[in-house]
Amino acid sequence: MEILKKERIFKGKLLSIYRRIVKHEDGTVWERETASYNGNAAAIVAVDGGELVLIKQFRPSVEETLIEIPAGRIDQGETPEHAAVRELEEETGLKAVNIEKVAEFYTSPGFTDEKIYLFYADKFEKGSVHLDEGEVLRIFRLPINEVNDYLFSGKIKDGKTFIGLLLWKVRGYER
């Protein structure tokens, strides 16, 4: 595979859209439109006192309120770990005392370069909620004994949350 041409066709506040001309190994040439998130994100599975600390947030792109793990953009010069701790505090008021990196993954590499760094935390200090401008969300505490119902009944539709909760279960953190 070879990128023959890359042209930005849109630049917004959070993302850019590119037209890429790609030459495949068989010699065929294809045009693809891709989105660049202009950065990466960090997300955190937070378990506090037998409950998962989640948020409910309206997402205009899908026109639904989704249940999600706390997450957000990694600021310029910031580490993924720091971003995860910052986002958790900003969105829930919990400040993680120690965190563990669980995974990193591309959210949808068929059209975007966004990568999410996923963390786990279960020890906290009290912090303070301070949402970003225009951000509206509600804290949602899910008892850990209800996680399977939420995962397998379609109540969790957000990819990072689905991956985060499945990895949390697979790694045995729920015990």
Image (cartoon, rainbow, N blue to C red):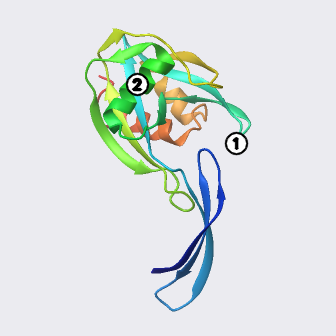
* Residue 12 placement (x, y as % from top left): 64, 49
Kindly indicate whether the residue at mark 1 contacts the one at mark 2 (C-beta within 8 angstroms): no
Residue type at numbered disc 2? Arg
* Residue 3 placement (x, y as % from top left): 49, 78
Between marks 2 and 1 in the image, the one whose residue lies nearer the viewer: 2
Residue 78 appears in view: yes
Local crowd at mark 1 within 10 Å, few (<14), some, or many (≥20)?
few
Q: Quick check: 144 left or right of 122?
A: right
Which of the two residues, 162 or 2, is positioned nearer the viewer here? Answer: 2
Q: Which residue is mark 2?
A: 86
Which quadrant does the N terminus fall into?
A: bottom left
Tally of numbered discs: 2
* Residue plotted at (33% across, 30% down): 82
Which of the two residues, 74 or 28, is positioned nearer the viewer here? Answer: 74
Q: Residue furthest top?
A: 126
| Element type where label 2 sits in the image | helix
Residue type at numbered disc 1? Ser
* Residue plotted at (59% across, 38% down): 157
Residue 74 in which image quadrant: top left
* Residue plotted at (40% across, 50% down): 105
Local crowd at mark 2 within 10 Å, few (<14), some, or many (≥20)?
many
Q: Earlier in the sequence, mark 2 or mark 1?
A: 1
Residue 156 in which image quadrant: top right
Which quadrant does the C terminus fall into?
A: top left
* Residue plotted at (49% across, 51% down): 114
Q: Quick check: 156 left or right of 99?
A: right
Residue 171 appears in view: no
Q: Which residue is mark 1?
A: 61
Q: Residue furthest bottom?
A: 27
| Element type where label 1 sits in the image | loop
